[in-house]
Image: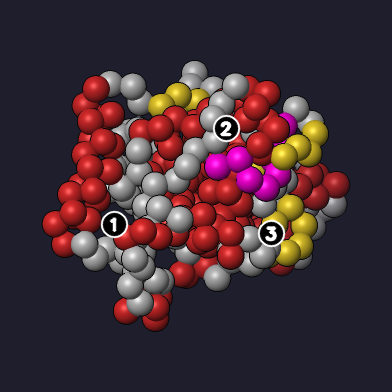
Amino acid sequence: MNDAAPESVIFGENHLSIEDVLAVAERRAPTRLQADDGFRQRIARGAQFLDTLLDREGVIYGVTTGYGDSCVVAVPLSQVEALPQHLFTFHGCGLGKLLDAEATRAVLAARLRSLTHGVSGVRIELLERMQAFLEHDILPLIPEEGSVGASGDLTPLSYVAATLTGEREVMYQGERRSAAEVHRQLGWTPLTLRPKEALALMNGTAVMTGLACLAYARADYLLKLATRITALNVVALEGNPEHFDERLFAAKPHAGQNQVAAWIRQDLAIDAPTAPLHRLQDRYSIRCAPHVLGVLADSLGLLRQFIETELNSANDNPI
């Protein structure tokens, strides 16, 4: 969790890591939106494609139709512009505690990265405003409870969509303020979401992905902490450091077990001369710590791949 932060985290075509999200969440790195013409044109083409499809076919799920089972219900063209506001309004029913500042920044980062693929039908202005929220640390107040998960973090992300339009509340400069008031203070015009933009903001996995990045970091930290505490216990109990001998783990070469045993050997300076043994065989909780903690060490690689794949995916519906 103390890894050096990048100079800046760029939201665009580049791959983001869990560490990038952490750097944003902890305010250890500034953020930028990719600024080259090619990127901006790709985002513009995504929004233009939506307009072209609407003109040519007249029916787009979530734009001129209802949602879910209501996809067979047509939305009159006269009401298409009003649909995004209705969408985030009726999902504003979250409950429970509010996400803390770090979690909220992680959510904004995850959502912004998803939308930079250019396949969600949003304007560059929307991406710029989301990056500005991160830059100025304007944090939508998002209740922890209310997401249905697999169908998208609809309810919590509705608070992001609403605050971009100047509705609901944000945390800004240490105070709970109305989003409209903060927009006025900064001289910004609240966004009027175009067709599909509310759905693009809400119907994705940004909350679970942002929280997963933070959970991964805590798990990684706890793994190293538990390993170091094991070494302290070996010293305090005058245990047998030979339980962590490299030759023993070479005979059962699970990578995680070997890594944890190596950390313990390093903490114990096991290559140095040792005093006479107080005990030949220590308790399971000591001598088998690498086998137990090694499962988490092995899992972190898979979890990183899983989380970062989702982080760098376009995951709203429809694409």
Query: What residue is shown with label 3?
Result: 144
Disc number for residue 319: 1
Residue 158 image point, x, y percent:
56, 55
Specify the quadrant of the image occupied by residue 171: top right
For residue 303, side relative to residue 41 (left or right): right
Decide: few, some or many residues near mark 2? Use Cα within 10 Å; few <14, some 14-19, many ≥20: some
Residue 260 image point, x, y percent:
58, 49
Decide: few, some or many residues near mark 1? Use Cα within 10 Å; few <14, some 14-19, many ≥20: few
- Region in magenta: 165-172
Whether residue 120 is visible:
yes
N-terminal of the two: label 3 or label 2?
Answer: 2
Q: Which of 189 and 215 is in front in this view?
A: 189
Query: What residue is shown with label 2?
Result: 133
Q: Tell me the kind of residue under disc 1.
A: Ile
- Quick check: is 170 in the magenta stretch? yes
For the residues bearing labels 3 and 1, Cβ distance under 8 angstroms: no
Q: Give the residue at the far left of this rendering.
A: 56
Q: Tell me the kind of residue under disc 3.
A: Glu
Q: Tell me the kind of residue under disc 2.
A: Phe
Closer to the eye: label 3 or 1: 1
